[in-house]
Amino acid sequence: MRCCLPLVFLLLIQKVSLQDVQAVVGDTVILPCSNSHEALLGKVSVFWRFGDTITVYDIMDSSVNFDEQATSYKNRVDSFPAEWTKGNFSIKLRDVRKSDGGTYTCFLLNVNAKNKVQLTVKDRPVTPTDSNSRNGDVRRRPDRLSLLFAFLLGCSLLCA
């Protein structure tokens, strides 16, 4: 019964906002969720979901609850409890994975609102390393050697 109660509230929520967030694989990203329009008095309940169904992070009666958190988010998600009284329920997602890309929803039960965040995850750009630079130099050496041999051959022909 305890699990069904939040689902009933989620169906009743009407206010929605949407934000886009970009991340790179391996980075840490903040997924924003705030309520600055109405005061949040007393204990608050906020539910973060991925794709509206997968539990990312739950705040129930102003306490973090990990009972329903999906395995893929274990030990990767934090929030900012000192900010809750100001209406900030953003979460920090560490070690971003390609599979984390998609729509996240922050349900604010106390004020009947939800915030949607579209997370786009890009692969980390490949940058040339020192070993690649050295390999590039190695490929150029035969050209330099050919020039050297041609020069030496020319000198030997002139001297003969």
Image (cartoon, grey):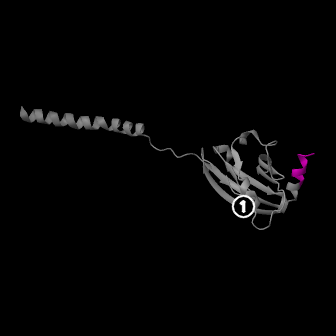
| Observer-nearest of 113 and 143 | 113
Q: Quadrant of the N terminus?
A: top right
State the SS at label 1: strand
Residue drawn at 26 percent across, 38 percent down: 144
State the predominant SS element of the stretch in magenta: helix
Tell whether 141 sits left or right of 3.
Answer: left
Q: Is residue 127 above or below residue 160?
A: below
Name the residue that disc number 1 marks.
Answer: 18
Q: Position of residue 107 (x, y in %)?
A: 80, 56
Magenta stretch in the rendered image: 1-8
Q: Position of residue 8 (x, y in %)?
A: 90, 53
Q: Amino acid at mark 1?
A: Leu
Q: Position of residue 31 (x, y in %)?
A: 68, 54
Q: Is residue 39 above or below residue 100?
A: below
The answer to whether any part of residue 51 appears in the image is no
| Observer-nearest of 90 and 70 | 90
Q: Quadrant of the C terminus?
A: top left
